[in-house]
Image (cartoon, rainbow, N blue to C red):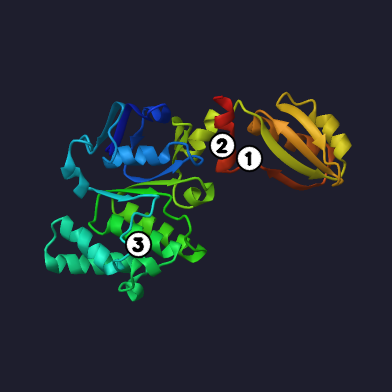
Amino acid sequence: MTTIIETEGLSKWYGPVLGVTDLRILVEPGITGLLGPNGAGKSTFLKLVAGQLKPSAGRVSVFGENPWTTPELFRKIGYCPEAQGLYADLTARESLLFLLRLHGYREGEVESRTLEALEAVGLVDRADRRVETYSFGMRQRLKIALALAHDPDLLLFDEPLNGVDPLWRIRLTALFESLASRGKTLLVSSHILPEVEAMTRQILLIHQGKVFAQGEIPAIRELIDTHPHRVSLRVDRPREMAKLLLESSSLEGVHFHPKQEGLLHLTVTNREKFYAFLLEVVVRNGFNVEEMVSTDDNLQSVFDYLVEGKR
């Protein structure tokens, strides 16, 4: 598959403040979720890719070109920044018309592209209101429209769903998936993990300016097999169960819930091996298991483990 974004030793610092350091990243077509807590370096990385910042060290390549020295790339890149950066005294329609004219489109195409972008984000009926009258969520949708109006091949979205109401979160997620199905490349940053899980399995974890992992969620899961996993088990004879489970080499610890009778909290190192052992224990001894939940079956736990493991 074609590589759209490639970085090698990419670093950016602001005086003594570190933005990102030694990033080695490959991004292919489709949607890649850029994950990390606030201040992790996500916005700095997106600005480097967009050509808005010059690297302090290393290199970044977009479609095989340097975005800092190749302004022609701007036709291929759509950027939705986290900051508002909108002209408050313009209407949404005027904002889009202005941007598309700057891109050199003819007047007829400017009009049609403006309408198409407004429809994509549900702002047609409010297109002639000044941006200063818009809610925060509406401004977010306008920024997305501005990013995609010129039909770029690469779309960079920095926290695009922040402040957007639940219904439009669903619609915008569907829009992103539609763009990806048309061959576009989307890099979507967020610190809210379920947002990214809803649109892609391809993720890039950044923390303290460094890449912690990149790949599909199952592949990243493999990176943390040596870390303990938490499993909750509700069973009819908890103390007998606990005694038998201690025979498993995959069990690191077992705790009884202080208030809920029959609930065990287990810490295991190899879930597949442990689950096989658990099944054998249940069948052989006739336990009644009412509930079993792995509290680590989500992207938050993956991120937490990776951060802890690299400290």
Which class describes the residues within 10 Å of circle 2: few (<14), some (14-19), or many (20+)?
A: many
Could you say where residue 266 lies in the image, as x and y percent from the top left?
75, 35
Residue 159 left/right relative to 104: right
Q: Residue at x 17, y 56 (%)?
A: 102
Q: Residue at x 36, y 32 (%)?
A: 25
Residue at the far bottom in the pictured view: 125
Q: Residue at x 44, y 31 (%)?
A: 209
Which class describes the residues within 10 Å of circle 1: few (<14), some (14-19), or many (20+)?
A: some
Q: Secondary structure at mark 2?
A: helix
Which class describes the residues within 10 Å of circle 3: few (<14), some (14-19), or many (20+)?
A: many
Front residue of this view, candidates 190 and 240: 190
Q: Quadrant of residue 247?
A: top right
The residue that label 2 is drawn on is: 302
Quick one: label 1 or label 2, which is nearer the N terminus? 1
Could you say where residue 143 lies in the image, as x and y percent from the top left?
34, 58
Residue at the far left in the pictured view: 106
The residue that label 3 is drawn on is: 142
Q: Tell me how far mark 2 sits from mark 3, CA to CA.
A: 33 Å
Quick one: label 2 or label 3, which is nearer the N terminus? 3
The residue that label 1 is drawn on is: 296
Are the two marked residues, 2 and 3, in contact with CB atoms closer than 8 angstroms?
no
Number of marks:
3
Front residue of this view, candidates 64 and 190: 190
Say which amino acid is labelled 3.
Answer: Leu
Q: Secondary structure at mark 1?
A: loop
Q: Quadrant of residue 226?
A: top right
Q: Tell me how far mark 3 sits from mark 1, CA to CA.
A: 36 Å
